[in-house]
Every structure is written in structure tokens, then in C-alpha cells.
Image (spheres, rainbow, N blue to C red):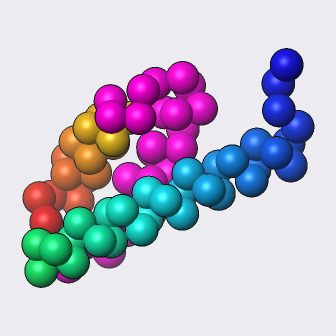
Amino acid sequence: MAPTAQAQSFRDNVINQRCTKAATDDFAKLAKTPPAGFIPFTCSCVVQEINAQVPVDQARATCKAQAIAKFGKP
């Protein structure tokens, strides 16, 4: 059974918020500032990957690699 559009949007927002918090915390621990757009790009990618049934760890690794390729290593 496919989720309703409202439920899917809620789920996407929750994933995006958790991803954004985790990424922000990771950069803070490293005392680094991410390039502009790095975190939104990465988290949007994670949402898409998870929606495609990709495991979370694999989604994070794939999206981090894509963000580094696009924005450079922070």
C-alpha cells in the first residue's frame, strides 16, 4: 500500500530534518563549515535514496560522495 501524498511529504520532511541535524552536528564536531548548499544537497539525495529503498548507510555514503564531487571536500 503506497503512502498518501501527505504521509509521504511528512516522512520526507522527517528524514530531511534528521539528516540535516546529523550533518550539522558532524561538521560542528569537526569544527568545519560546510560549503553553501552541501547539507541541503546531501539530505535531499538521502531522502530520494531512502524512498528508492536504499539502506540508510548506503544512502548516506552515496550522497556524501555525490556532494563531495559537486562541492569539493569540506
What residue sits 74% from the left and 53% below the top? Answer: 10
Q: Residue at x 15, y 58 (%)?
A: 72
On screen, residue 29 versus residue 12, left or right, reads: left
Across and down, in percent, residue 70 comes to 25, 52
Q: Is residue 33 found left or right of 54 in the rendered image?
A: left
Residue 66 appears in view: no
Query: Which quadrant is home to the C terminus?
Result: bottom left
Q: In which quarter of the image is residue 28?
A: bottom left
Percent position of residue 1, x then y: 85, 19
Residue 46 colored in magenta in the image:
yes
- Residue 18 lies in the magenta stretch: no
User: Of 36 and 14, which appears nearest the observer?
Assistant: 14
Say which quarter of the image contains residue 14: bottom right
Where does residue 36 sit, x and y in percent of width and height? 32, 74
43 lies left or right of 3:
left
Residue at x 59% of width, y 32% of height: 51
Q: Which secondary structure type mostly characterizes the magenta part of the structure?
A: helix
Q: Which residue lies furthest to the top in this view?
A: 1
Q: Which of 2 and 48 is in front in this view?
A: 2
User: Where's residue 41, x and y in %?
Assistant: 41, 56
**Boundaries of the magenta span:** 32-58
For residue 11, above or below residue 18 = above
User: In front here: 23 or 71?
Assistant: 23
Residue 30 visible in this rendered orientation of the protein: yes
**In the figure, is residue 29 to the left or right of 39?**
left
What residue is drawn where x is 83% and y is 32%? 3
